[in-house]
Image (cartoon, rainbow, N blue to C red):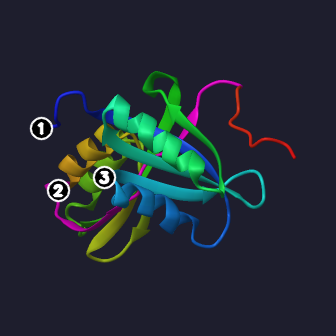
Amino acid sequence: MAPSGVSRHTLSVLVEDVEGILSRVTGMFSRRGYSIISLVSAQTENPGINRLTIVVDASERIMEQVTKQLNKIVPVIKVVELEADSTVARALMLVKVAANNANRPQVVDAVNIFRARVVDVAQESVVVEATGTPGKLAALLDVLESFGVLELVQSGDVALGRGPKAMAPPRN
């Protein structure tokens, strides 16, 4: 159980795509003893600029400190905390499930219910791709576990604010 006053926060951080930027950002967290729940780094619509989506469990006071410290890192362009009610966030999960000729139709039915996709079929297994909220992915995984999960990999959240407002970097 999380300590009182601690809640989940999602930060969207625009950074210059320079060598070592991920190490500098994660180092800032680890030096201060803050845990990162998930971290995703990806290119943006602007060449040379990446977006880091960082999910952390922390108090409001710690989030203020984190934001201030991130803004001090030179290749960091902009830091925004995304509010849950005005954010679209998704994660990706790939799961290899034991599936033979006898149970494959049931596996495919379960996958379809969750609007996931079978992306690879082998004689004794299928690989399923699913995107969604952590709750949706956990529910799908619960169903698939009855067939036998052979392998699993899951990304952290990627997130954008809703509506027309964009988190554009300042123009030079």
Helix, strand or loop at disc 3? loop
On the image, the x and y values in percent for residue 64 come to: 44, 34
Helix, strand or loop at disc 2? helix
Q: Which residue is mark 2?
A: 145
Q: Amino acid at mark 2?
A: Glu
Is 24 a magenta residue? no
Residue situated in front as seen by the camera: 77 or 167: 77
Left/right placement of residue 30 relative to residue 144 reads right
Between label 3 and label 2, give the one nearer the viewer.
3
Q: Residue at x 40, y 37 (%)?
A: 63
Helix, strand or loop at disc 1? loop
Q: Which residue is mark 1?
A: 1
Residue situated in front as seen by the camera: 169 or 155: 169
Q: Earlier in the sequence, mark 2 or mark 1?
A: 1
Residue situated in front as seen by the camera: 66 or 156: 66
Residue situated in front as seen by the camera: 79 or 126: 79
Q: Which residues are magenta?
A: 145-164
Marks 3/1: CA–CA distance:
15 Å
Q: Are marks 2 and 1 in contact (CB under 8 Å)?
A: no
Label annotation for residue 147: none
Q: Residue furthest right?
A: 172
Q: Which residue is mark 3?
A: 35
Q: Residue at x 57, y 71 (%)?
A: 20
Is 162 a magenta residue? yes
Q: Earlier in the sequence, mark 3 or mark 2?
A: 3
Between label 2 and label 1, give the one nearer the viewer.
1
On the image, the x and y values in percent for residue 126 come to: 33, 67
Q: Amino acid at mark 1?
A: Met
Local packing at callout 1 (Cα closer than 10 Å; few below 14, some 14-19, many 20+) is few
Q: Quadrant of the N terminus?
A: top left
Marks 2/1: CA–CA distance:
25 Å
Q: Quadrant of residue 170?
A: top right
